[in-house]
């Protein structure tokens, strides 16, 4: 983006709000922004975890503030937007809608409560974040959004219906906003990783936790720190998608070039595994 005729990288010296900043990718975003000279509001439903991230940010010499926020509640997200400006004494220039939970299980085993819990956090939390900050960015004349989705948004793996749908919504939202907000000098990036070592399996409701824990330890192909750095770099370049791992890129290519063949492959693989 250009500000007063000068090209500005959105991740550099940003006044940023990061949701789900108490651990995992959210914490890594906060730390990477600190290294880039940013001031960060670290939001999390777990205030103690957010405070731990703030301490780590401050150890890097940057300013940070901890705010408790349940992203499933729109009024709290709106309050977060107002409070962030007051704490940083500046307009927010970057919001990272990262807070999310994991949920797995067969479609007919998922209750309405499961659907609501997952959609309220994973999808509505992101929608609320965009609704709270987009008008402010338009008024400011520039801004940037990173929405954390998942490769699940396009891989559509079996026994992950609710999670897949929530993350597909985040990706669709991000794609739409990228086109709609370009004229307003607002950049959008959507992050779509596969396995990243975080607490999402530990804190979520997913089957086969032992297998997934093993996969996180041995097959993740990346770390949350690398993912955060790559995503911010791609945001600076004006790229819409961040697909960090080789397996995610392979699935993305298969789905886009041969969607029917991919669907058959997925169904056959699932049947053989069962």
Image (cartoon, grey):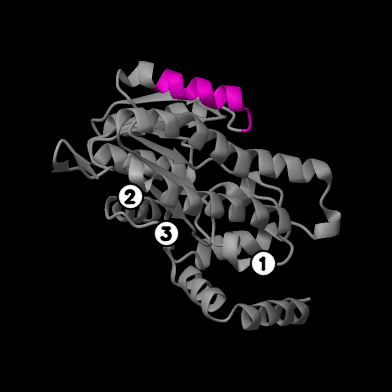
Which quadrant would residue 86 be assigned to in this image?
top left
Q: Residue at x 30, y 33 (%)?
A: 141
Q: CA distance from mark 2 to mark 3?
A: 11 Å
Residue 192 place in picture, x, y as percent? 49, 58
Magenta-span inclusion, residue 134: no
**Which label sits in the foreground, 1 or 3?**
3
Residue 274 place in picture, x, y as percent? 79, 76
Residue topped by disc 2: 232
Residue range in magenta is 72-84
Q: Report the side of 72 relative to 133 (left or right).
A: right
Q: Which tag, 2 or 3, sits closer to the chain's start?
A: 2
Tell me the number on the disc at residue 241: 3
Residue 15 place in picture, x, y as percent? 31, 31
Q: Which tag, 2 or 1, sits closer to the chain's start?
A: 1
Q: Which tag, 1 or 3, sits closer to the chain's start?
A: 1
Q: Secondary structure at mark 1?
A: loop
Q: Quadrant of the N terminus?
A: top left
């Amino acid at each position: 983006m250009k500000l007063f005729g000068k090209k500005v990288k959105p991740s550099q010296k940003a006044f940023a709000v990061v949701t789900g900043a108490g651990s995992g990718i959210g914490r890594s975003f906060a730390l990477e922004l600190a290294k880039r000279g940013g001031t960060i509001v670290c939001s999390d439903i777990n205030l103690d975890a957010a405070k731990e991230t703030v301490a780590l940010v401050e150890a890097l010499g940057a300013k940070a503030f901890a705010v408790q926020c349940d992203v499933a509640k729109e009024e709290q997200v709106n309050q977060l937007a107002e409070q962030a400006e007051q704490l940083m004494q500046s307009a927010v220039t970057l919001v990272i809608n990262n807070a999310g939970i994991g949920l797995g299980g067969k479609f007919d085993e998922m209750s309405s409560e499961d659907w609501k819990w997952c959609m309220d956090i994973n999808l509505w939390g992101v929608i609320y974040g965009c609704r709270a900050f987009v008008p402010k960015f338009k008024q400011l004349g520039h801004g940037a959004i990173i929405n954390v989705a998942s490769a699940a948004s396009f891989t559509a793996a079996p026994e992950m219906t609710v999670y897949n749908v929530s993350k597909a919504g985040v990706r669709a939202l991000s794609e739409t906003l990228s086109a709609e907000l370009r004229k307003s000098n607002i950049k959008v990036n959507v992050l779509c990783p596969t396995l990243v070592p975080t607490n999402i399996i530990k804190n979520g409701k997913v089957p086969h936790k032992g297998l997934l824990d093993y996969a996180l330890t041995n097959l993740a192909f990346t770390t949350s720190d690398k993912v955060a750095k790559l995503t911010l770099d791609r945001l600076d370049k004006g790229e819409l998608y961040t697909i960090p791992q080789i397996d995610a890129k392979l699935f993305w290519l298969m789905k886009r070039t041969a969607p029917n063949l991919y669907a058959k492959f997925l169904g056959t693989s699932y049947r053989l595994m069962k």
